[in-house]
C-alpha cells in the first residue's frame, strides 16, 4: 500500500500551514515481555479491528486528514486500573500500515506528539509526510493514539465551550501568567471540567501513569511483543514513565525534546520560561536587523517595548476580526507559539507590528488559535482542557503563597510575559480543588534496569525543553544523546534534517545508535 500522491499533496499543504503558524551499538533485550495481571487479561487479549476513520475527527482540519490510507480503531481500557471490572474508556487509534512487503515489516511505531493533551491521531498523518523519504514508513506501521481524555478518545476532557475559548477564557495558571484567581474560581473550574467530562472520576483518571498503562495494552492489542516508541516533548515524559513501569516490554525508544525527569514542577516551569525568554531575545535580535522592527532596533529594549504593547490588553483587548478580540493571554500565547521554531519568527513579528501600528490582533490571534486548536469553522479541540487535567494529575501542588512566589520568579526569568500587576493574593494553583492527588511523583524514571539502549535527541536552542535535559534522561534510562544544533523544539518526526532522519531510521530499524560525539546541524 502506498500513500497516494494527491493525499501527500494535501498533507504537505496542511503541514506547511501549521509550520507557518507555529512556524557503540545498542542491544536488543532478550527478556520476555512482562505478563499482565490476570484481571487485566481481557484488555490485553483484545484484537483491534481497523477500518474507516469516519467519526474520529473532532475538527474540520482533522476530517481532511483522517482519510484513506489511514485507518482507525478503538482500544478498551479500564477507567481505573485498580478496579478493572468497573467503567472503561475508549482510546482512539489511527494507523498507517507499513508500506513495504509484509515480510519486511518490523512492527508498530507508536507515536506521541507531546502536550500533554496533543492528539496522536492528528500528528500521525503529518509525521507520515515528514518521514516519507525515510525507510521508517516502509518497515513500520505508524500508530498514533489520543491518550485518555484527549481528542477522539472517550470520555474526553471538556472544561470550556467554544464560545469561552473564542473569548480567551480558556486560560489556566498552568499555561498562562495573566489573570486573577480566587478559591471560588479554581473550585468552579474543577466543577465545570467534571460536568463536561463525565464526572470527577474521569478527571482523576487521566494522569501520565494511566496513559502509560494504556500504551502497554495498546502494544499487546497491536500484536507487538515489544514496544517501539517515538515521543516528542511531553511524549518523552510518557515514554520515560512507560520505560520505568514496563522496561522488559521495550524494543526501542526515541526521545525528542526531553523533559528532565529530575526536575520538580516549579523548577521545570522556570527552566521552560527561561528558554522562551532566550528565544524571544534571539527573535528581537533578528527583528532589529530590519529598520521597521516593531520591537525597535535595540534588542536590549525589546522586552520593555513588548510590555508596553501587550500589558494594556489585560483591561482593553483590541479587535481581531469576526467579532473577536485579542487579550493579553492570547497575545502572549501567540508570540510563545511562534517561538517554538525560528522559521515562525517573521509571522510573529508581523503580528506584533499589526498590534503596534493598527491596534489590531488578527495575526497574533490566528497564530494562537492554530497552535492550541481552533479550526476555521470555530470548533476547538480539547488540547487546553486535557492539558489542564493531565497536569493536575501529574504536577506538584502549590499553596497560594507558593504560586505567587513562582509567578514572581517566572516574571524574573521571562519578563516578556510580565503583566505589570501585583501577584500577591490573586494567584492560585488551578488544580487546588482537583478530586485526586498527583500520581506521577518526582523524580520519576530513575535508575531503570532491564531497558534497551535509547536514542535521546536534544537541540541546543530548544526553547521548551532545555538542551541539558537530554543528559539527565540518558543518565536515568541509559542511552545515547544526539546533539542537534539549531533553534527549534523537536526535529525527529518532521523530516527536516537528513542527518537526523538517517540516525533515527538506523536506530529504529537496525537498533544502531550514533557514535559518541555525533552531531547534526539544522
Image: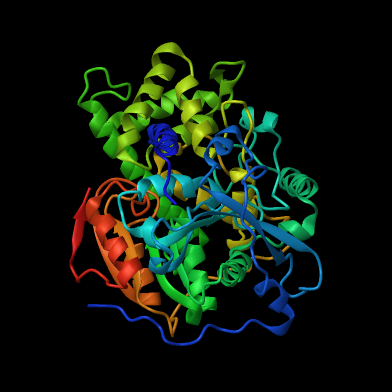
Can residue 444 be seen by looking at this rendering?
A: no
Find residue 203 and report its horizontal and vertical position in percent. Answer: 72, 56
Nearer to me, 371 or 307: 371
For residue 475, which quarter of the picture? bottom left
Q: Nearer the viewer, residue 254 or 280?
A: 254
Q: Residue furthest top?
A: 358
Whether residue 449 is visible to the viewer of this picture, yes or no, is: yes
Q: Does 200 sit left or right of 223 as displayed?
A: right
Q: Is residue 421 left or right of residue 281?
A: right
Colour scheme of the picture = rainbow
Q: Position of residue 75 (x, y in %)?
A: 66, 61
How many numbered marks have been drawn onto this rendered protein structure? 0
Q: Position of residue 373 (x, y in %)?
A: 56, 37
| Residue pictured at 59% horizontal, 67% vertical | 218
Instruction: Residue at 51%, 23% (x, y): give it.
Output: 312
Q: Looking at this view, name the residue that lies furthest to the bottom.
A: 31
Q: Is residue 306 above or below residue 323?
A: below
> Front-most of 317 and 226?
226
**Looking at the image, residue 190 lies above or below residue 167:** below
Q: Can you say whether 67 is above or below 134 in the image?
A: above
Q: Where in the figure is residue 354, as x and y percent of width and height?
A: 41, 17
Closer to us: 181 or 170: 170
Q: Is 289 placed above or below 455 here?
A: above
Residue at image position (34%, 38%) is 280
Amino acid at each position: 500500500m502506498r500513500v497516494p500522491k494527491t493525499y501527500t499533496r494535501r498533507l504537505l499543504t496542511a503541514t506547511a500551514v501549521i509550520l507557518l503558524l507555529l512556524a557503540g551499538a545498542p542491544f536488543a533485550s532478550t527478556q520476555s515481555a512482562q505478563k499482565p495481571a490476570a484481571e487485566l487479561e481481557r484488555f490485553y487479549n483484545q484484537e483491534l479491528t481497523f477500518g474507516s476513520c469516519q467519526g474520529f475527527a473532532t475538527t474540520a482540519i482533522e476530517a481532511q486528514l483522517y482519510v484513506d490510507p489511514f485507518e482507525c480503531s478503538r482500544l478498551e481500557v479500564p477507567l481505573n486500573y485498580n478496579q478493572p471490572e468497573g467503567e472503561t474508556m475508549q482510546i482512539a487509534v489511527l494507523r498507517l500500515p507499513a508500506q513495504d512487503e509484509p515480510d519486511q515489516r518490523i512492527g508498530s511505531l507508536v507515536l506521541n506528539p507531546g502536550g500533554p493533551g496533543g492528539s496522536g491521531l492528528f500528528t500521525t498523518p503529518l509525521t507520515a509526510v515528514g518521514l516519507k523519504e525515510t525507510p521508517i514508513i516502509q518497515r513500520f506501521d505508524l500508530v498514533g493514539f489520543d491518550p485518555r481524555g484527549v481528542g477522539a478518545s472517550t470520555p474526553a476532557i471538556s472544561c470550556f465551550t467554544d464560545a469561552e475559548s473564542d473569548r480567551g477564557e480558556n486560560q489556566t495558571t498552568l499555561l498562562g501568567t495573566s489573570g486573577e484567581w480566587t478559591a471560588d474560581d479554581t473550585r468552579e473550574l474543577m466543577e465545570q471540567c467534571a460536568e463536561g467530562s463525565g464526572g470527577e472520576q474521569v478527571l482523576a483518571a487521566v494522569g501520565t501513569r494511566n496513559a502509560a498503562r494504556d500504551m502497554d495494552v495498546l502494544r499487546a492489542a497491536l500484536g507487538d511483543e515489544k514496544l517501539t516508541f517515538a515521543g516528542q516533548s511531553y511524549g518523552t515524559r510518557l515514554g520515560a514513565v512507560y520505560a520505568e513501569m514496563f522496561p522488559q516490554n521495550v524494543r526501542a525508544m526515541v526521545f525528542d525534546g526531553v523533559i528532565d525527569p529530575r526536575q520538580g514542577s516549579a523548577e521545570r516551569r522556570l527552566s521552560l520560561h527561561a528558554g522562551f525568554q532566550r528565544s524571544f531575545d534571539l527573535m528581537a535580535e533578528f527583528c532589529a536587523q530590519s529598520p521597521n522592527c516593531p520591537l525597535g532596533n535595540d534588542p536590549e529594549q525589546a522586552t520593555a517595548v513588548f510590555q508596553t504593547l501587550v500589558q494594556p490588553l489585560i483591561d482593553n483587548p483590541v479587535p481581531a476580526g469576526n467579532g473577536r478580540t485579542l487579550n493579553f493571554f492570547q497575545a502572549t500565547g501567540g508570540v510563545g507559539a511562534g517561538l517554538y521554531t525560528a522559521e515562525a519568527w517573521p509571522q510573529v513579528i508581523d503580528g506584533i507590528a499589526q498590534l503596534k501600528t493598527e491596534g489590531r490582533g488578527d495575526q497574533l490571534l490566528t497564530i494562537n488559535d492554530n497552535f492550541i486548536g481552533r479550526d476555521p469553522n470555530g470548533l476547538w479541540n480539547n488540547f487546553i482542557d486535557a492539558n489542564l487535567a493531565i497536569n493536575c494529575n501529574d504536577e506538584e501542588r502549590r499553596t497560594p503563597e507558593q504560586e505567587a512566589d513562582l509567578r514572581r520568579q517566572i516574571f524574573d526569568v521571562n519578563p516578556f510575559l510580565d503583566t505589570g500587576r501585583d501577584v500577591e493574593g490573586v494567584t492560585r494553583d488551578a488544580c487546588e480543588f482537583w478530586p485526586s492527588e498527583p500520581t506521577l511523583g518526582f523524580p520519576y524514571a530513575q535508575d531503570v534496569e532491564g531497558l534497551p539502549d535509547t536514542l535521546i535527541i536534544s537541540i541546543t536552542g530548544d526553547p521548551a525543553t532545555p538542551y541539558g535535559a537530554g543528559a539527565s534522561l540518558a543518565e536515568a534510562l541509559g542511552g545515547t544523546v544526539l546533539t542537534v544544533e539549531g533553534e527549534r523544539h523537536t526535529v525527529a518526526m518532521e523530516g527536516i534534517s537528513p542527518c537526523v532522519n538517517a540516525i533515527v531510521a538506523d536506530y529504529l530499524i537496525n537498533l544502531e545508535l550514533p557514535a559518541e560525539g555525533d552531531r547534526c546541524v539544522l
